[in-house]
Image (tube, rainbow, N blue to C red):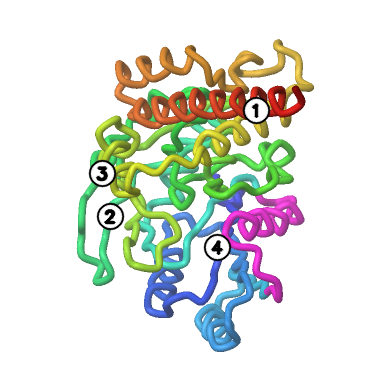
Amino acid sequence: MQDQEKIGIVLATYNPQIEYFQKQIESIQNQTWQNWVCYIVDDCSQPKYQAEIKNIVDNDSRFICHFHSDNLKHYYNFERGLQYCVKDSTITAIAFSDQDDIWQAEKLEVLITKLRSEQLLLVHSDLELIDSYDETINPSTWNFEGRNPENATVELLLLHNVVTGCSLLFCTSLIPYILPFPQHEIGWHHDWWVALVAIQKGKIGHIRQPLIRYRIHSSNTVGVVQDAGKIYTEFIVWASKKYRITGKSYLFHYNLSKALYDRFQHETNSSRANPFDTLRLDFGLPILKLCYQSWCMGYGSEGIGLRIWILKVLFDIKQVQKLLLKIFTRC
């Protein structure tokens, strides 16, 4: 099987801390599954970092460096990396990599075995949290955040992403549905979009074994939050922002839901893994039912759902006020 399956790895870089980057490269080289190619997609790093990157991987032809003169940020940079994978027809599955983590040696082998044995479209694993000195902060990200990804549905995943990019592996058959990425919104991430497409088209697999040593430090693009998505956690975050209400979260989730709906609305009901009406969240009262479902299932997105519903109500009130003001002004 290993001779037949070739995994494409998209490793996004931007001014990496070289010590961390070297450990990441070594962990990829030490994989028990050796049939892979890694596209290093650099997002306009400074020349000194580009030179270091090239020097570290120069003796291994499986690493292919692409240095870019335009900075697209991580969301579009990963999309750029996928486009390199598309050009290699021998790649059958794709993994994402950050520039500062450490992969367990059996990561790719465990993921692709699960992917094929259960005929999945995407599979992802738990992660061990480590600090800047490679010391364990928590042996399980899923336990730390209270994640139960086995209970994910399209609707719940639209509320709260439980799939971490560096831990996933997905079939190349998803690429036509993934690309191009929807127009970027603040807070959107490549792994969230890929996971949404995968769960819409078929089945996602979950492995509770930590296959990544996920580094937490000051330069992280995305971190982790204890008991993320729960009501009391959302309240604490809101309090830390001095109880400010902007409505951006509502618009963010609304636009993400619309992007998924727009991508698949042309398909017939019979050809989809999930019903058509689940592609767009109802941000009215039904979202409260979804919050209850999340709480009962232990998915952990009830706090996010409640926040969005409150913002939706406030947004509607504001729109009505604007309309009334316009009417009275004309009168």
Q: Disc number at residue 325?
A: 1
Q: CA distance from mark 4 to mark 3?
A: 27 Å
Residue located beneath label 3 in the image:
226
Q: Position of residue 165 (x, y in %)?
A: 48, 49
Residue located beneath label 4 in the image:
11
Q: CA distance from mark 2 to mark 1?
A: 52 Å
User: Does residue 59 show up magenta in the picture?
Assistant: no
* Kind of residue at badge 4: Leu
- Residue 90 vertical position relative to residue 175 in the rendered view, above or below: below
Q: CA distance from mark 2 to mark 4?
A: 19 Å
Circle 3 SS class:
loop
**In front: label 1 or label 4:** 1
Q: Position of residue 150 (x, y in %)?
A: 38, 27
Q: Residue at x 62, y 22 (%)?
A: 279
Residue located beneath label 2 in the image:
129
User: Does residue 90 show up magenta in the picture?
Assistant: yes
* Kind of residue at badge 3: Gln
Circle 2 SS class:
strand
* Kind of residue at badge 2: Leu
Q: Nearer the viewer, residue 12 or 9?
A: 12
Badge 2: residue crowd in 10 Å (few <14, some 14–19, many ≥20): many
Q: Is residue 185 visible?
A: yes
Q: Position of residue 316 (x, y in %)?
A: 56, 24
Q: Is residue 197 visible?
A: no
The region drawn magenta spans 68-91
- Toward the right, the furthest residue is 266
Badge 4: residue crowd in 10 Å (few <14, some 14–19, many ≥20): many
Q: Position of residue 186 (x, y in %)?
A: 56, 50
**In front: label 3 or label 1:** 1
